[in-house]
């Protein structure tokens, strides 16, 4: 019988909480230390994380020297998908706030996503994605956000700024002409859709299965400046 085996705990900077990495049979699971919100992610269900990169990167793949930013490393599947859909001259930056998550991807988690951090096109920054994008005006062809559980911060309340009007305006400034913002969420959020419109984005919300072609669905907003 499968059981959860705790492998490591990683403190969340400036928060007081922590993330926990568990082994569960052949899979890995990340949970909040407190148990709040149950599983944050696991290696068995990553269809929507793949799509978060596949959709926007498919739109910009032919651009020379395409440059993209991923907010949140997670289990590495979004990064792996971005690298798969971009050309050899592309650059993919990943901003990850929790140092332990980076180490897990370099260690036991890496095999599940194919060790994308070893790709020379990929650079991981141990930084808050909000600070990274604010320092890169017109720096990216695409920005993909998989921070926390979506527009409503779960693991770190400071993440809420990223999804505010000010945060969305910062994303817009960081995009190159005809750049694309993609935002992952565990569930649909009409208020966030309205906020995107107020921030000047034309957004389509896409429902994507978390695993296979049935069961739970997640939401990805694909946004372009109006």
Image: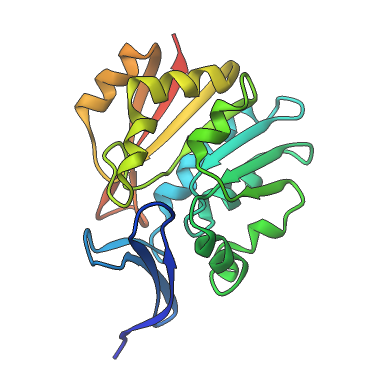
Q: Quadrant of the N terminus?
A: bottom left
- Outermost residue to the top: 226
Query: Along the horizontal axis of the image, is 200 left or right of 102?
Result: left
Of residues 60 and 123, which is closer to you in this image? Answer: 123
Q: Quadrant of the C terminus?
A: top left
Residue shown at 48% from the left, 34% from the top: 130
Of residues 35 and 4, which is closer to you in this image? Answer: 35
Query: Along the horizontal axis of the image, is 223 left or right of 59?
Result: left
Of residues 212 and 64, which is closer to you in this image? Answer: 64
Residue shown at 23% from the left, 67% from the top: 35
Residue shown at 50% from the left, 62% from the top: 101
Query: Along the horizontal axis of the image, is 13 left or right of 149?
Result: right
Residue shown at 60% from the left, 72% from the top: 107
Looking at the image, can residue 207 be seen? no
Query: Along the horizontal axis of the image, is 139 left or right of 201?
Result: right
Q: Position of residue 206 (x, y in %)?
A: 34, 33
Q: Position of residue 134 (x, y in %)?
A: 54, 26
Count every numbered label the image shows and give the total: 0
Q: Tell me, what colour scheme is on the image?
A: rainbow
Q: Position of residue 53 (x, y in %)?
A: 52, 41
- Outermost residue to the bottom: 1
Q: Position of residue 114 (x, y in %)?
A: 62, 63
Looking at the image, can residue 202 be seen? yes
């Amino acid at each position: 019988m499968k059981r959860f085996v705790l492998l490591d705990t990683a403190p969340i900077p400036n928060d007081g909480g922590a993330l926990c990495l568990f082994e569960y049979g052949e899979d890995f699971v990340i949970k909040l230390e407190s148990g709040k919100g149950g599983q944050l992610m696991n290696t068995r269900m990553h269809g929507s994380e793949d799509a978060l990169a596949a959709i926007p990167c498919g739109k910009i793949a032919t651009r020379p020297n395409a440059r993209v930013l991923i907010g949140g490393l997670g289990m590495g599947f979004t990064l792996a998908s971005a690298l798969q859909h971009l050309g050899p001259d592309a650059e993919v930056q990943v901003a990850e706030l929790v140092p332990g998550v980076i180490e897990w991807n370099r260690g036991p988690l890496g095999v599940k996503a194919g060790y994308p951090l070893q790709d020379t096109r990929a650079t991981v920054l141990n930084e808050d994605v909000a600070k990274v994008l604010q320092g890169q005006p017109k720096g990216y062809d695409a920005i993909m956000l998989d921070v926390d559980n979506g527009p409503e911060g779960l693991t770190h309340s400071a993440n809420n700024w990223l999804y505010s009007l000010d945060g969305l305006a910062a994303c817009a400034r960081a995009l190159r002409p005809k750049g694309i913002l993609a935002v992952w969420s565990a569930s649909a959020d009409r208020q966030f859709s309205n906020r995107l419109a107020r921030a000047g984005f034309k957004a389509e919300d896409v429902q994507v299965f978390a695993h296979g072609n049935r069961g739970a669905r997640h939401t990805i907003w694909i946004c372009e400046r109006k």
